[in-house]
Image (cartoon, rainbow, N blue to C red):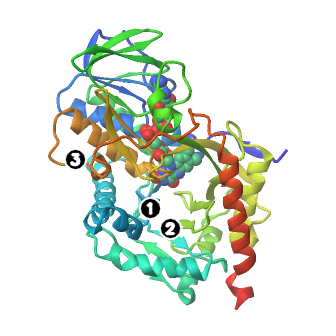
Amino acid sequence: MIKHEKNFPYWWDIKDSLAAPENTALPSEVDLAVVGGGFAGMSAALTAAEAGLSVILFDEGQPGRAASTRNGGICSGHLRIPHSVLAKEFGLENADSVYGEAAIAREDLASFITQHDIQCDYRQAGHFTGALSPADFDSMKREISALQAIPGIDVSLVEAHELTSEIQTDRFYGGTLRRDMAGYHPGKFFSALLKIVLKAGVQIEANTEVQEIASLGGGVKCLITARGAVRAQKVIVATNAYTGRKPSFGHFLRRRLVPVQSCIMVTERLGTARVKSLMPGLRLYGNTAKLSCYFRPTPDGTRILLGARSFDRLIPSDKSIHYLRRMLAAMFPSLSDVAVDYCWLGNVAFNRTYLPTIFDKDDITYVGGYGGSGTVWARWLGKKAAQTALGQTNAPSIFSQLYDGKPPPQIPFYDGEPWFLPFVNARYAVQDKLNSLKFGSRKTRN
Ligand SMILES: Cc1cc2nc3c(=O)[nH]c(=O)nc-3n(C[C@H](O)[C@H](O)[C@H](O)COP(=O)(O)OP(=O)(O)OC[C@H]3O[C@@H](n4cnc5c(N)ncnc54)[C@H](O)[C@@H]3O)c2cc1C
C-alpha cells in the first residue's frame, strides 16, 4: 500500500467553512428549485435570487463536495473540440462564437471574484500545453491564427528552443501558452460562493436527495424528497457527473452524460524554489496525450498537484497512485521519489457532442457535460440557465443554439453505467504508448 497522508481533497484542508447551514422546514412552493449544489446549481440559484425569485437548492450531500471542490482549480474554460473542427461542422461564425463565449465566461468569473472580493488565490497565471510529438505541435500551429483573431483570447506558440523558460522537461516539442487562463483555490472560492448565495436569500437544503420531479401541468413541477415535496414554477437540474442511477430521478440525463473518474494527487511540500525551478512561470499545465494529465503548483507554490485518469471509482488504489507518480516522474525525473500527501477521486462528465450543454426538456432546464473544464463552464451555464428561467433570452448561450436547443444524443446501450470506459481508456493508452515509443523525449531524439 502506498503511503499518502490524506484521502480527501487538498482543497478541503482550509480554515474557511465549506458546510451549509442546518436545514430548515421545506416551503410548500417556490419560484425556482435547483437540483445540485455545485458551481452550476449555486450560480443558477444566485442569479435567480438576485432577480427577486424565491429559490430553493437541494443537494443530496453537502453542496460543493462533489466535482466543484475536487478539481484541479484550473480556470481554463477549455473546449474539447478544436476551433477548426467546429468551423467545419457549424461554420466559422459559430466556431468563433463558441471560443468567444469561453473568453466571456472566463472574464465573468474573474469579475465575479473581484466584485465580491473573494480571497481564493485567483491568479491569471497562464496555461501551457506541451506538444508530445512534432505532429501535435504542427496541429497547434494550424489552430493558433483562428484563435488569435477572437477577442479575449491571448495565445502564443512556444517553440522548442523557448521551452526552458516555461517548463524544465524534455518531453515536449513545443507548446501553446494561453495567457488569458487562470488558476485558483476551488475550496476557498466555493466557501465564499456559499456565503454569497445564502446572503442573497437562497434556501439551501443539504443531504436532501431529489427522488423524483413530477409534472403538475402548465410547466409547474413537484420535487419529491424524503423530507417532503415542494412545488416549483421552474426547475434547473445541475447534477452533471453525479446524476447517478437513482430509480426515479435523472433517467433522461444519465443516458446522455458519461461520468468519467479522474484522480488527483498533491505531493509533499517541495518548497517554492524547487517548484519554481521546474515550472518557472508557476502556470497551469497540460499535454496533448489522449489520456492527458494536468498539473500545477499549489497556490502557495510549495507543492505540485497532478491529475489524470483513475483506475478506481471511490477511493484511489495503489494502481492509480502509481500511475500518477509515473506521469509526474516522466515529466520531471528528479521527482520520482517524492511522497504523496493528498490523493482523491472525482467525476467529470462528457456527452456525445464533447461540448458543454444547456437545454430544456419537459419544462426542466438541464446543464452539464463540461468535459472536465467546469470551473468556468458550470458557473457560466448555471447563470445562463437561470437567465433562461427568468425569461432573459436576449443573450442566450451559443450552446443552446448549436444543436437548435436539442439535448445531446442518447448513447446507445447505455443507462448511466459506463461499461465501455475501460475499452476506450485501453485504446487511448495504446495510442499514447506508441506515440511515446516513437517520439520519447526531445533530447534523446535530437
Ligand atoms: C478530479 C477532477 C478534476 C477537475 N479539474 C478541473 C480543472 O482543473 N478545471 C476545470 O475547469 N474543471 C475541472 N474539473 C471539472 C469541474 O470540477 C466540474 O465540471 C464542475 O465542478 C461541475 O460542477 P457542477 O455544479 O456541474 O457539478 P458538481 O459540483 O458535481 O455538483 C453536482 C451536485 O449534484 C448533487 N446531486 C446529484 N444528484 C442529486 C439529487 N438527485 N438530488 C440532489 N442533489 C443531487 C451532487 O451531490 C453534487 O453536489 C475537475 C473535476 C474533477 C472531478
Q: Is residue 396 left or right of residue 443?
A: left
Answer with mark 2 or mark 1, whichever residue precedes in sequence. Answer: 1
Secondary structure category for the residue under label 2: loop
Separation of residues labelled 2 and 3 (CA atoms):
32 Å
Percent of width and height locating residue 106: 34, 57
Please name whichever residue, 154 or 277, is drawn nearer the observer in this view of the structure: 154
Whether the residue under disc 2 has CB within 8 Å of ligand 1: no
Question: Picture quarter containing residue 190?
Answer: top left
Identify the residue under disc 2: 283
Residue 222, placed above or below residue 237 = above
Name the amino acid, label 2.
Answer: Arg
Q: Residue 111: where, in percent of width, then height?
A: 27, 53
Q: Which residue is tagged 1?
A: 81
Closer to us: mark 2 or mark 1? 1
Tag nearer the camera, 2 or 3? 3
Residue 28 is drawn in which quadrant? top left
Query: Looking at this view, is 442 or 306 the one in front?
Result: 442
The disc labelled 1 sits on which kind of residue?
Ile
Q: Which residue is mark 3?
A: 396
Who's the residue at 65% across and 43% down the image? 344
